[in-house]
Image (cartoon, rainbow, N blue to C red):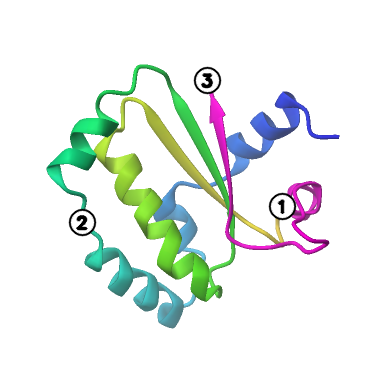
Amino acid sequence: MITPQFLKSHFERALSYDAYLATATADQRASWTVFHNKVHLSGAHTDLLNSFARQLNVLVISGTWCGDCVQQVPMLDHIARACPSWISLRVCDRDVHSDLAESVMICGGRRVPTVIFMNE
């Protein structure tokens, strides 16, 4: 059973976006960086994000090798960086946090990326 303490424990052990990318191979980091550089938020997006009034903790279960993660997690990083007062992004490796990945399996599989949005 997933409890708030279980999620909090994984959130606290998960890595910042940059620290997570540091665990990747050079080729993987290059792919993530190329996509990260393609993402840009509009002024309307930034305004909306800055209208948030509550802390939002975002925990991503990922794999540095995962093509879908390469395309989706950098977008979440841009969102978190646009609103650092309200959004905290942490990323964890699916295989390192296997108990978490198994707790949130989708269709019987440990899918990545899986994103969990939590309030304070």
From the image, tell me which residue sits under label 1. 97
Reply yes or no: does residue 43 show up in magenta.
Answer: no
Residue 60 image position (x, y, % from top left): 56, 49
| Residue placed most toward the observer, 44 or 97 | 44
- Whole-angstrom CA distance, mark 1 to mark 3, is 21 Å
Nearer the viewer's eye, disc 1 or disc 3?
A: 3
x, y percentage for residue 70? Answer: 44, 69
Q: Which residue is mark 2?
A: 40
Residue at (17% x, 39% y) in the render: 44
Gap between marks 2 and 3 measured at Cα? 27 Å
Q: Position of residue 109 (x, y in %)?
A: 78, 64
Percent across and percent down for residue 50 are 24, 27
Q: Is residue 24 visible?
A: no
- Of tags 2 and 1, which is closer to the observer? 2
Element type at mark 3? loop
Q: Amino acid at mark 1?
A: His
Per the image, the residue denoted by label 3 is: 120
66 left or right, relative to 109: left
* Above or below for 6 versus 80: above
Q: Which mark is residue 114?
A: none
Question: In the displayed structure, would residue 51 be above or below residue 74?
Answer: above
